[in-house]
Amino acid sequence: MLGVLHSLIQELIFENISLDYRILPGRPVNGIAVVDGDKSISHRSIMFGALADGVTKISRILEGEDVLATIGAFRKMGVEISRDEEFYLVHGVGINGLAKPDSLLDMGNSGTAFRLMAGILAGQPWQATMGGDTSLSGRPMGRIIRPLTEMGAKIEAENEMPPLTILPNNQLKGIHYEMPIASAQVKSAILLAGLYAEGETVVREPAPTRDHTERMLSGFGYSIKRYGDLRDHVSIAGGGGLAACDIEVPADLSSATFFILSALISSDSELHLPNVGINPSRNGVLGVLQRMGANIVLQDQREVGGESVADLIVKSSLLQGVSLNHTDIALAVDEIPAIAVAAACAEGVTEISGAEELRVKESDRIATTVSGLKALGADVTEKPDGMVIQGGSLKGGRVESHGDHRIAMAFAIAGNVASSEVHVSDVGCVATSFPGFYDLSQRVGLNISIS
C-alpha cells in the first residue's frame, strides 16, 4: 500500500501539483529507520566514476531528483551509466574523455552538483552551459566564479547567477586560494578544476568543512594532500588520472537527522538507524545534539570505502539550549533547521551565530526557519547571521516550506510534538534529497498524511 501511495505522490509532483503534509501530534516513534543513501557521496561517486578509467560499481546510491540530475548531465557528456537491481555501473571515460553536450546541463535543484560540475567543466576544451530550476537560478555563484576565473576559466553569467556558460579552455593554472568563507562546495569546485590545472592547486580553509571530495579522490587513486599546523591546507596537482573502484554509499546523516530529532523530542521513543555515515568533517550535528543532552549511542563504528559509518541508537531526551558559532555551523550547516526545532523543544536559550551561509541555500534558511518556528508559536529572534531561540513548546499551525526540502522535513517532525495538528506546505521538494521520507515517517509511527 505504501509503495502505491509513494508512486501516486511522485506522479503528483511530476504534474506540478502542490502537496502538503498534515501531521497529527502525540505518537512515539520506534523501530528501525533505514535511511536513504548519502546525497553528497552519491553525487561524487557518479562524477568521479565518470572521470575514471574503468567501470565503477555503486551500491545504495540515493535516487533522489538531485542525484538523477547529475546522472543525466554525465550521460549528456557521453558517459554510459546503467542500473541493475543492486548497483549503478558508471563506465568511466577517463579524466579527458568527456564529450561536448548538445544542450544545456540541467542540474535541477542541486547546488552541490552545480558547483562541483563548474570545476570539472572549467577545464574542458569545449563550451557548455549549466542551469537549474527556479530555486537554483536564484542562488549566487560568485564564490566559485571568482577562484575559477583566477585559475584561467572563462565563465559568463548574468549577475553571477545561473545559468553559467563556461567557455573552452586550453590550460588552467594552479593557484593558492584563501577561502573567505568555509564551504565544502567551493573547496571541491577548486580542487576538481585542479585536476585539469598546470601545477599545484592549494585551498586554505578558514574552518574545517566536509572532506568527501578529498576522501573519494584518494579512493579513486588520486594523490591529494592536507597539511599545515591546523591541517587547513588541501592541495592537488593536475595531470593525474582516476582508477575505477567499488563504492558503497552509507546512509545520509543529514537525512537521518530528521529521524534522530523525531526520537529525541517525542516521548517514549527509541529508534535504531543502521549504517549511517559519520564522517568527522560531517558529523557536527551529533556533537551539537549530544551537547544538548541527546541520548545517542554509536555502535559498531567502522570504515566502508574510506567513509566512517556506525549504527545509531537514539532515545527520548530532555534537551538543553546551547550556543553555536561558525565552527559548529561549518560541520552541521545542512542540519541547522532540525537543530532549531530541537532548540524550540529544549529548556533554556539556544543562540546560533556565524551562519550567514544559510542565507544562500535552497531558501534563506535563517528566515524560513525563523518564520516556521514563529508559525508554531516559538519564541525566536532573527539575527543577520543566525537566530536566538527560547526553548519551550510548540503549538499547531501552518508552516510554509518555501520549496526547501530541509525546512519541509524539519517541521514535519516538529508536528509530532505540537499541541495540535501542523500543516507543512509545498512538500514535493522533499523528493530532491529524500524520496523515502514520507514512507519511513509512517513506518516509525508518525501520524503523517498528504493533503
Image (tube, grey):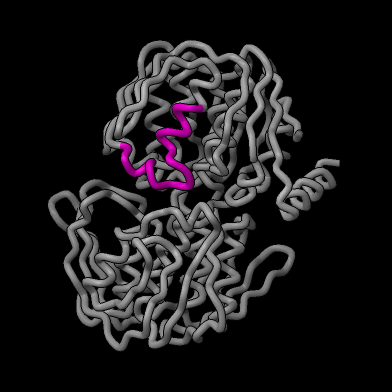
Q: Is 221 situated above or below 347? A: below
Q: Nearer the viewer, residue 442 or 110?
A: 110
Q: Is residue 79 above or below residue 70?
A: below
Is residue 276 in view from this perspective? yes
**Residue 311 visible in the snapshot:** no
From the top left corner, tell me how far across and down residue 277 is, in percent.
49, 47
Who is closer to the viewer here, 356 or 157?
Answer: 157
Residue displayed at 29% across by 68% down? 224
Q: At which x and y percent is residue 217?
A: 38, 68
Q: Which residue lies at the image location 60% right of the left edge and 56% below the top edge?
A: 62
Q: Is residue 337 left or right of residue 87?
A: left
Q: Nearer the viewer, residue 19 or 1?
A: 19
Query: Is 235 inside the magenta-drawn segment?
Result: no
What range of the chain is rendered magenta? 355-371
User: Looking at the image, which residue sits at the far front?
Assistant: 158
Please tell me whether residue 369 belongs to the stretch shown in magenta: yes
Towards the viewer: 61 or 193:
193
Quadrant in which residue 178 is drawn: bottom left
Q: Quadrant of residue 403?
A: top right
The residue positioned 40% from the left and 14% from the top of the image is: 390
Measuring from the top left, give residue 362's x and y in whole percent.
Answer: 48, 47
Residue 17 placement, left or right of 195: right
Quarter of the picture containing the N terminus is top right
Quarter of the figure that contains the C terminus: top right
Left/right of residue 434 with respect to residue 180 in the rendered view: right
Name the residue located 78 percent from the left edge and 52 percent from the top edge.
Answer: 11
Q: Is residue 288 above or below residue 426?
A: above
